[in-house]
Image (cartoon, rainbow, N blue to C red):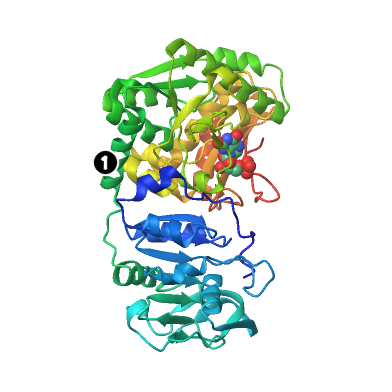
């Protein structure tokens, strides 16, 4: 349980009317969240089996669950012990719903305790890998091999099972590693089948989803697109929608869906701040206009943004001003092109689970935007310019957005693009940003991308980019002494951007990039490689 860091959260979306309406016709597995850091991962694993899954609060009542009519319920892990005072409990009526339940770790202990078994502190806690010794290879454990390594993380253990339960598997330290009440379709596993280190974990999840809950594979990209289009039409009617296009996979997919659903009722606005990479604004416009035949309102705000940060070298102030200017331009342009009833946002499912930035109109119960979820995440909208929201991607995880993007023909370079910060190259020029410095960095960055693309190793990196430093150093070229800028190469590997390691890039790649930058980019005479991990460094330099 030490892996589970958060308290059981009440922040997860409780049953909202939209959630209820949207799901009634679709088979789904509900995950009741008791605060495990893996709850979201369970949902993703289920969806990988092409069955829809949602994470909701453990406080959800049996009656609410009955209304949602899921095909199965999973109780997540959590940081508590079931015998703790104030430990999160589920509605005990859940056991009588006749819906199959799988308890994972804390979820299993809760099931055992609430149904009359006994859970106590284990003689020996079990963290990390353990071999699963199978007592009943049918049902939940079909196709899970004897000795499969499963990921354990628990200090408590089941001492006595409730009536009607049987042991399906044990480990050296844990007598009840997997248990079942076959007749009532109640199952529990002490390990975490959802984590990647658990061999056969996905097989177990598939057994639960397909054999026990009798689901069918209905959660597919094509089904999602069809349903999203239907929902957009029903929600928007004949009203107008504004979409701020950034060129990333979320806003591009969103634009495509909206355009397909409501045609020219959606206006796609692309604000060019002047901080994008070489050729990107042109490529984006060409893609939308020529390939997708979606008109884009191009707003050239390059001069404005540059003026705003003229002479500013403090990174936070730079970001603040860029974010603020984004809101100004957005506001002006939306008034010019409007009026609009709705703002389309690329809210994804993890944002919904965290439900950070949401505001609900008390009269209509609808979510309204008081902030633009731009890549800057700053700045509020004026009171008279608050839009209702249309968020067709709010059920999707990032990898699902990529699948949808791919299915509608977004090129791979957008679908699998490295993360790129909202303020763009402005925060990859340390200190003051000038047009001259932007041009230098754009050329250096272009060479980096060209070389790694040519070698087909773009996806070996989480990010790989160039940074320009506002200092000059001495060099020599031919017979000439030079005094010019250094460029830093920042190549990192990472899972999620929260931590990162510097990439061990091949020397010959670095050599080629360095030679090309120094020879081809004017006013650069030195290239250095950043070998700092995060922490203590950050990925970006500002
Ligand atoms: P740091 O530099 O904090 O970056 O290690 C972590 C990840 O976040 C990206 N990043 C941003 N993304 N707006 C964004 O949308 C921003 O202002 C921003 N700043 C950093 C960064 O590229 C890395 O992937």
Q: Nearer the viewer, residue 256 or 534?
A: 256
Q: Say few, some or many: other residues with alpha carbon within 10 Å of mark 1 (under 14 / 14 to 19 / 20 or more).
A: few
Residue in front for this viewpoint, 197 or 527? 197
Tell me, yes or no, if residue 539 can be seen here.
Answer: no
Residue matched to label 1: 226
What secondary structure is found at the residue carrying circle 1?
Answer: helix
Q: Position of residue 282 (x, y in %)?
A: 40, 22
Residue sitting at 54 percent across and 28 percent down? Answer: 372
- For residue 537, above or below residue 442: below
Residue 282 in view here: yes
- In the image, taking residue 301 as reference, residue 433 lies left or right, namely right
Q: Ligand 1 is in which quadrant of the figure? A: top right
Closer-to-camera residue (216/10): 10
The C terminus: image quadrant: top right
**Name of the residue lying farthest toward the right:** 314
Dividing the picture into quadrants, the one containing residue 471 is top right
Image quadrant where residue 438 sits: top right
Which percent across, then down, holds residue 9?
60, 56
Percent of width and height locating residue 320:
67, 26
Residue for point 61% across, 66% down: 3
Residue 453 horizontal/vertical position (percent) = 41, 41
Q: Quadrant of residue 184?
A: bottom left
Extreme top residue here? 336
Quick check: 387 above or below 146?
above
Residue at position x 28%, y 37% in the image: 230
Q: How many marks?
A: 1
Question: In the image, 331: left or right of 532?
Answer: left
**In which quadrant of the rendered image does the N terminus lie?**
bottom right
Say above or below: 411 vs 396.
Answer: above
């Amino acid at each position: 349980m030490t892996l589970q860091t958060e308290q059981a959260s009440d922040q997860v979306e409780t049953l909202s009317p939209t959630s209820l309406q949207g799901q009634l016709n679709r088979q789904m597995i509900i995950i009741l969240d008791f605060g495990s850091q893996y709850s979201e991962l369970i949902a993703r694993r289920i969806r990988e089996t092409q069955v829809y899954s949602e994470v909701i609060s453990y406080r959800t009542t049996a009656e609410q669950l009955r209304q949602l009519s899921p095909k199965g319920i999973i109780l997540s892990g959590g940081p508590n012990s079931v015998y703790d005072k104030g430990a999160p409990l589920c509605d005990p009526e859940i056991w009588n719903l006749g819906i199959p339940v799988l308890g994972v770790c804390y979820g299993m202990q809760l099931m055992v305790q609430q149904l009359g078994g006994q859970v106590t502190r284990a003689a020996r806690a079990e963290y990390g890998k353990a071999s699963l010794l199978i007592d009943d290879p049918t049902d939940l454990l079909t196709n899970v091999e004897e000795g499969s390594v499963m990921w354990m993380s628990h200090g408590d253990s089941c001492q006595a099972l409730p009536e009607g339960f049987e042991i399906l598997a044990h480990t050296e330290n844990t007598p009840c590693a997997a248990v079942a009440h076959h007749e009532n379709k109640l199952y529990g596993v002490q390990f975490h089948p959802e984590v990647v280190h658990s061999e056969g974990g996905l097989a177990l999840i598939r057994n639960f989803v397909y054999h026990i809950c009798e689901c069918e594979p209905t959660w597919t990209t094509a089904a999602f697109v069809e349903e999203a289009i239907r929902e957009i039409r029903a929600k928007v009617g004949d009203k107008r929608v504004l979409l701020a296009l950034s060129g990333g996979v979320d806003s591009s997919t969103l634009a495509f869906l909206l355009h397909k659903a409501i045609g020219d009722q959606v206006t796609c606005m692309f604000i060019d701040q002047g901080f994008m990479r070489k050729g990107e604004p042109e490529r984006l416009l060409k893609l939308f206009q020529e390939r997708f035949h979606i008109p884009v309102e191009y707003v050239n705000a390059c001069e404005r943004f540059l003026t705003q940060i003229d002479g500013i070298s403090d990174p936070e102030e730079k970001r603040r001003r860029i974010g603020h200017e984004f809101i100004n331009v957005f506001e002006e342009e939306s008034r010019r092109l409007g009026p609009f009833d709705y703002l389309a946002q690329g809210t994804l499912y993890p944002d919904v689970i965290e439900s950070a930035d949401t505001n609900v109109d008390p009269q209509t119960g609808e979510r309204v935007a008081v902030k633009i979820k731009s890549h800057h995440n700053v700045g509020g909208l004026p009171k008279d310019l608050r839009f209702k929201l249309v968020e067709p991607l709010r059920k999707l995880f990032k990898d699902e957005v990529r699948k949808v993007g791919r299915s509608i023909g977004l090129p791979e370079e957008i679908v699998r693009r490295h993360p790129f910060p909202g303020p763009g190259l402005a925060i990859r020029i340390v200190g003051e940003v000038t047009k001259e410095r932007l041009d230098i960095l754009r050329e250096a960055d272009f060479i980096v991308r060209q070389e790694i693309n040519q070698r087909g190793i773009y996806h070996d990196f989480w990010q790989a980019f160039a940074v320009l430093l506002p200092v000059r150093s001495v060099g020599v070229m031919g017979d000439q002494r030079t005094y010019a800028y250094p460029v830093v190469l920042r190549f990192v590997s990472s899972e999620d951007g929260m931590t990162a390691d510097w990439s061990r890039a091949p020397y010959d790649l670095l050599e080629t990039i360095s030679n090309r930058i120094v020879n081809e980019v004017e006013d650069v005479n030195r290239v250095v490689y950043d070998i700092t991990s995060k922490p203590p460094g950050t990925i970006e330099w500002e």
